[in-house]
């Protein structure tokens, strides 16, 4: 009888151990993950590679699993797409599919109202995850758009998220208060702006004559990118302003840090 009980105990123990990986896999399966989605449409099914063609192409990450945070992250991504493509509609609620349809419809309406208007519209947004660790997820969006006018619109934008809550992180969440003064000093030096003069004394367009960090902050495993797009702090002709710092050199200013995980 004792042997039977011992054998039964061993079998039960082995069965319990065999079940553990399944539980661990379940936890992994339910963790935050991402897929990539692309939505495209062209006028009358034209092909951009074959010549003039009005078209739009949106490629962007989609958060999956992870209760609560998924909704926050996907909403922030869709808000970015909406504000970039349909920038005249503040507070709009169009889905990415509706944005694509409206882009083509708006072109048709403009072409009908102004028959002499024959320049095709183009819009391409390509978004992807460029870095991820336990404290931050960094997304980069490359935008190239033309909807008439003297020139098109091109930008690089970043969105940073807290993996635990899904919160969209701003510069205050990422850096200490002293970082802005550090960057301003470096910016003035690189742009030949005297230390004691107005930050706009050489033609910059900082709001309220006060230096500020850009809204677009890129984070990778080994560097931090501060990206001012055209128009943000200077006339269009001045182009973009980009400051790049090795993370090791500005570690004292960074609030978030961690080990890289699989992107």
Image: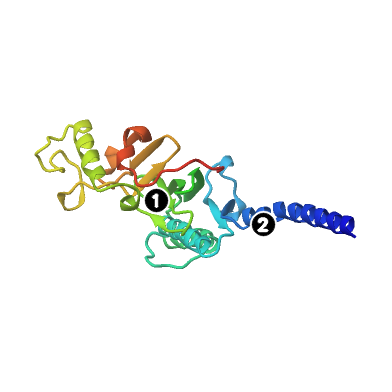
Q: Where residue 220 is drawn, which disc sits there?
A: none
> Which residue was labeled with disc 1?
148
Q: What residue sits 48% from the left and 50% below the top?
A: 123
Position of 78 relative to 196 (above/below): below
Q: Position of residue 217 (x, y in %)?
A: 36, 45
In the picture provided, is 90 more to the left or to the right than 206? right
Q: Say whether residue 240 is visible.
A: no
Q: Say whether residue 66 is visible.
A: yes
Q: What residue sits 75% from the left and 56% below the top?
A: 16
Quarter of the picture containing the N terminus is bottom right
Q: Position of residue 214 (x, y in %)?
A: 30, 47
* Front of the two marks 1 and 2: 2
Q: Where residue 26 is drawn, which disc sits there?
A: 2
Query: Is 255 in front, or is 52?
Result: 255
Quarter of the picture containing the C terminus is top right
Q: What residue sits 55% from the left and 56% below the top?
A: 63
In the picture provided, is 9 more to the left or to the right than 59? right
> How far apart in space, not on screen, are marks 1 and 2 (Cα)?
51 Å
């Amino acid at each position: 009888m004792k042997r039977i009980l011992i054998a039964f105990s061993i079998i039960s123990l082995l069965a319990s151990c065999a079940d553990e990986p399944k539980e661990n896999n379940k936890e992994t399966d339910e963790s935050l993950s991402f897929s990539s989605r692309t939505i495209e449409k062209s006028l009358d099914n034209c092909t951009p590679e074959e010549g003039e063609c009005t078209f739009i192409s949106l490629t962007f990450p989609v958060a999956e699993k992870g209760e609560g945070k998924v909704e926050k992250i996907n909403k922030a991504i869709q808000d970015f797409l909406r504000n970039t493509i349909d920038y005249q509609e503040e507070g709009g609620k169009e889905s990415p599919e509706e944005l694509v349809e409206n882009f083509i419809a708006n072109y048709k309406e403009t072409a009908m109202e102004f028959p002499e208007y024959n320049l095709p519209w183009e819009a391409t947004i390509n978004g992807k995850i460029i870095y991820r660790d336990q404290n931050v997820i960094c997304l980069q969006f490359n935008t190239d758009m033309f909807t008439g006018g003297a020139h098109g619109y091109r930008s690089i934008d970043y969105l940073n998220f807290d993996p635990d809550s899904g919160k969209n992180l701003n510069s205050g969440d990422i850096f200490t208060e002293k970082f802005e003064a550090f960057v301003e000093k470096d910016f003035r030096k690189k742009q030949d702006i005297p230390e004691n003069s107005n930050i706009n004394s050489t033609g910059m367009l900082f709001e309220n004559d006060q230096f500020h960090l850009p809204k677009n902050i890129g984070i990778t495993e080994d560097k931090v990118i501060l990206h001012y797009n055209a128009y943000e702090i200077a006339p269009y002709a001045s182009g973009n302003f980009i400051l790049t710092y090795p993370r090791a050199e500005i570690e004292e200013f960074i609030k978030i840090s961690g080990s890289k995980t699989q992107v």
